[in-house]
Image (cartoon, grey):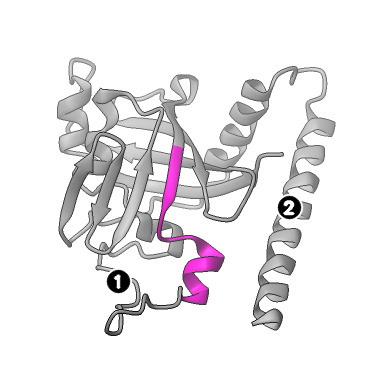
């Protein structure tokens, strides 16, 4: 168990070092232009979407989705807490367009179950769950980057995602595409016909 904890801490340390390096690299390239955290995140987003090497398709969640309460959604055995999400964007989660399995690299929409309980004893948490945080994730911010959503068929977002056991959130970027959308398409209709076509980790925010 000590070895496992040491390994997990080492991985998070390396991720944090990478995040610092990425932040410093971006700041050096555009130090004159970046003055706020928001501008920095937008710059990261611009770089991420420009380096996109082709459209990806992420299937919707194929299991059962339960809205437990206003800020809690359950995907079969996996819970997602959502805060700071406008009512118009909640359908992205409630319809299974975004689901916790994406964090673990599951883009097919298949059900990822947590380990079952044995008799009256709670199951030990899977090491994979601890490392990648597919259960009890929390989203505290989900907002469109309107400066990069320059087509009626595409909307791009940034996400603050918290993993259990980590003190700082991770920044992700996400792109939704609806090929039938026009300038007149409202957000509800857009989401109903949309799929994720880009999803990527950017940095741990320090």
Mark 2 crowd level (few <14, some 14–19, many ≥20, 10 Å Cα):
some
- Closer to the eye: label 2 or 1: 1
- The quadrant of the picture occupied by the N terminus is bottom right
Residue 196 vs residue 147: left or right? left
Residue 122 vs residue 49: left or right? left
Q: Where is residue 53 in the image (x, y as percent from the top left)?
A: 51, 52
Q: Position of residue 154 (x, y in %)?
A: 34, 32
- The quadrant of the picture occupied by the C terminus is top right
For residue 50, which quarter of the picture?
top right
Q: Which residue is drawn at 18% across and 53% down?
A: 65
Residue that mark 2 sits on: 16
Does the stretch in magenta take in 200?
Answer: no
Residue that mark 1 sits on: 113
Q: Where is residue 190 in the image (x, y as percent from the top left)?
A: 20, 30
Does the stretch in magenta take in 138?
Answer: yes
Q: Vertically, is 90 above or below 166?
A: above
Camera-nearest residue between 46 and 164: 164
Part of the protein shown in magenta: 126-139
Q: Vertically, is 77 above or below 82?
A: below
Camera-nearest residue between 64 and 42: 64
Q: Vertically, is 156 above or below 61?
A: above
Is residue 100 among what the camera can see?
yes
């Amino acid at each position: 168990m000590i070895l496992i904890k040491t390994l997990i801490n080492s991985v998070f340390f390396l991720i944090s070092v990478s995040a610092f390096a990425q932040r410093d690299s971006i700041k050096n390239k555009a130090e004159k232009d970046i003055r706020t955290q928001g501008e920095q995140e937008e710059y990261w987003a611009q770089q991420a979407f420009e380096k996109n090497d082709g459209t990806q398709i992420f299937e919707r969640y194929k299991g059962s989705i339960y809205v437990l309460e206003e800020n809690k959604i359950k995907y079969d055995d996996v819970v997602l807490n959502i805060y700071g999400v406008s009512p118009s964007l909640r359908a992205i989660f409630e319809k299974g367009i975004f689901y916790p399995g994406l964090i673990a690299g599951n883009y097919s929409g298949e059900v990822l179950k947590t380990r079952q309980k044995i008799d009256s004893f709670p199951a030990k948490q899977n090491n994979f769950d601890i490392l990648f945080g597919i259960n009890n994730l929390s989203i505290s911010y989900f907002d469109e980057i309107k400066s990069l959503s320059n087509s009626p068929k595409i909307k791009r977002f940034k996400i603050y995602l918290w993993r259990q056991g980590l003190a700082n959130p991770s920044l992700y970027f996400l792109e939704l595409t609806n090929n039938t959308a026009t300038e007149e398409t409202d957000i509800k209709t857009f989401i109903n016909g949309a799929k994720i076509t880009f999803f990527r980790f950017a940095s741990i925010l320090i």
